[in-house]
Amino acid sequence: MACVNRPKSFIDFWIKNTCAILLLLAGVVHPDPQRYQDASYNGRGPDADYDGQYGGYDAQDNRRPEGQYFGDGGFDVPDGRRQYPGARRFDEGATRLSLQNLRSLLQHVDGLTSQECTKNVLTQWDYETNVGPATQERATVSQLQYASFQRAVKEMLAKVDREHVQDPKLWRQVQFLTTIGPAALPPHLLDRYNRLINDMLTVYDTATICAYNDPFKCGLKLEPELTVIMARSRDWDELQYVWTEWRRKSGQKIRDLYEQLVELSNQAAKLN
């Protein structure tokens, strides 16, 4: 889906790297090797979904004998699905759409998502380039509105019976549109999450220090003054002073906010 992307900031770098770690810590469950060695699985692994009352597997083609009811035995496509889907097998609330109808629905959702995403990104960029109470409040409201839209899309697409979507591209679209990141948090936690990010950005963008050789020359910000000094100065003492002082004025204030953000990101990873 198309969406205007703003230039990446230091906060973006932080968040993206944090999310990668959080997915490993909170969103991915590492399998227990002992489970795979359990004789009850007979070498098939815990995802085999074996249950004696259904008759077990057919030794010839590794399919359940009642394959007509459960489908064609598996999807041999690299789209992230298990070969033997079954999580929604008896979900009576799932809606089975034809590929044409699903494709039309996703095209409509894609257009709406592009519009909402672009509006949100432009508001965030306005805040990042003009940090202040007014732009921060607009950014927070915009984030909440976009999250509300994401939740509405997820609730709608969650009703689609994905196990019978044979087109891997459409299946992946549904999968990605229903994985909404921090928007999965309850509204009060999402508001806190967004305000933490905006507060961190405010600290990062407004931190200032005084010059190394001129203590009365203050108000030096990361952009452009400190960036120029770090790029051009060859004075080790000046470089050390600038880095240490700026980190003291920014990093120390952000640390507590960042720890809270990690906690909320963990919760969001579990909800997704």
Image (cartoon, rainbow, N blue to C red):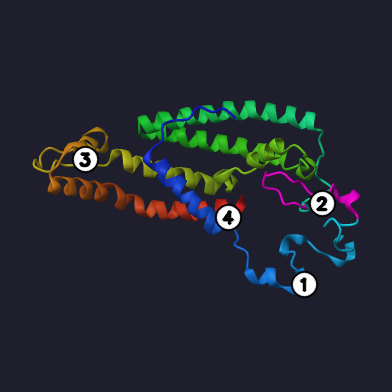
Answer yes or no: is residue 196 visible: no
Which residue corresponds to mark 1?
A: 40
Q: How many marks are shown on the rendered structure?
A: 4
Residue 27 is marked as 4
Span shown in magenta: 66-84
Which residue corresponds to mark 2?
A: 89
- Three-letter code, disc 1: Ser
- Three-letter code, disc 4: Gly
Q: Residues within 10 Å of mark 2 (few under 14, many from 20)?
A: some
Marks 3 and 4: in contact by CB < 8 Å? no
Instruction: Tell me the distance, in whole angstroms, between the alpha carbons under discs 1 and 4.
Output: 27 Å
Marks 1 and 2: in contact by CB < 8 Å? no
**Whether residue 27 is situated above or below residue 112 in the rendered picture:** below
Instruction: Tell me the distance, in whole angstroms, between the alpha carbons under discs 2 and 4.
Output: 23 Å
Q: Residue at x 37, y 35 (%)?
A: 133
Instruction: Tell me the distance, in whole angstroms, between the alpha carbons under discs 2 and 3.
Output: 59 Å
Instruction: Verify whether residue 190 appears in magenta.
Output: no
**Whether residue 45 is situated above or below residue 269 in the rendered picture:** below
- Three-letter code, disc 3: Met
Residue 230 is marked as 3
